Amino acid sequence: MLVGIVGKPSTGKSTFFKATTLAEVEIANYPFTTIKPNRGAGHAKVKCVDKEFNVQCNPRVGYCLNHNRFVPVELLDVAGLVEGAHQGAGLGNQFLDDLNQADVLIHVIDVAGSTNAKGESVDPGNYNPSNDVRFLEKELDMWYLRILKKGWEKFARQTVQEQAQIDKALTKQLSGLGVTEEMANEMRKKLNLNEKPTEWDDATLLRLATEFRKRTKPMIIACNKIDVPGAAENFARLENEFPDRMLVACSAESELALREAAKHGLIEYIPGESDFKIINEPKLNERQKKALEFIRENVLRKFGSTGVQEVLDRAVFGLLGYVAIFPGGVGKLQDKDGRYLPDCYLLKRNSTALDFAFRLHTDIGKGFIKAIDVKTKKAVGKEHILNHRDVIEIVTSK
């Protein structure tokens, strides 16, 4: 799974990326600070199952805080996109192509309206953030259209002349974007397209490109800088204007400050929670104390969290529909090194017990006999659909 972080310059994309990964990246308030994409590991948050078994888990990867399991997911922060990116503006084609493998997108916008269309700083409220929602979707649609139309006339003629299966041909044309034959067939039926691609006009191709983009690059909008005066009012307007979009109010700067303070042992903080606890007050200077109190009063108490963890969780578990599955055994939750519930895997929605077995290891999948739901102690077959937070034991022939 790859989560892409996108948006125009200076909206706080790199701050969002650093807040979720604590990776060292350059952060500055001017366009094109990021040129090469940054990669790092963020963490999706899952209520750990360890408490249900009255144990404390010991993750092999990721970590657990107060029975909250944080499972690694790969993040990609690409350079800021500007209007005309699909035509190469601001190295836009290069930056868009960096997103080819992304499964889901987080669009970071400046909801305070303090960054204009070019990514330049303006006074809060001087720019309408709804423009950014439309602009990015348009750029992504035009990017898909560019790929779809590459060699289109030849492609369309061959498809008709050879009576090739259109869905298979479309899949080949858009193979780098994760389009499948099933998806192509579904989209053609949805748009009621005829069997002759040579008759599809530019408007039809754009509609098709848009549908493929929505399906293969689902998107959540992180409405950043929510703590800036006027931002909350803008956020409310966006919710009314775009009722079909997934919008989350957030403050990446606040999240970064809290995670850094926790990293240095100054506070106890669980990402996604509505408060923190100061545990080393003597080491905090007055400026730091005021900053933490500002975050508590103006972000956490007003919005319930900084929103950053919620954005990532909703992208993984909401838009993509992944489920978290824990390997375990009935009566034995420890591995050979004595670690309780050391692993947690993220699997696609509707994954089966057999899918999970193969995810663990090819030999385990090939030797599959049955699975056991450790919570209920009931045996299940290979076609059994797994549920979020299941603990599963695989019984094999070896």
Image (spheres, rainbow, N blue to C red):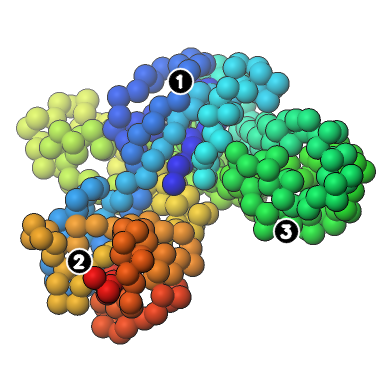
Tell me the element at label 1. Answer: loop
* Residue 219 numbered mark, or none: none
Q: CA distance from mark 1 to mark 3?
A: 36 Å
Depicted 352 relative to depicted 177: above or below? below
Image coordinates for residue 389, horizontal then vertical, percent: 33, 67
| Residue at (32, 83) in percent of width and height | 379
Q: Is mark 1 in CB contact (under 8 Å) with mark 2? A: no
Mark 1 highlights which residue? 36
Q: Which residue is mark 3?
A: 186
Disc 1 marks which amino acid?
Lys
Going by the numbered disc 3, the residue's amino acid type is Glu
* Dot 1 alpha-carbon crowd within 10 angstroms: few under 14, some 14 to 19, many 20 or more: few
Q: Can you tell which of label 1 and label 3 is closer to the viewer? A: 3
Q: Residues within 10 Å of mark 2 (few under 14, many from 20)?
A: some
- Place residue 175 in its image quadrant: top right
Name the residue beneath numbered marker 2: 50
Write the residue at 58% across / 22% down: 94
What amino acid type is highlighted by mark number 2? Answer: Asp
Instruction: Give the foreground label among 1 and 2.
Output: 1
Q: Residue 305 in the image: state x and y as whole percent.
A: 36, 48
**Counting residues from the N terminus, which is met first, the one under dot 1 or under dot 2?**
1
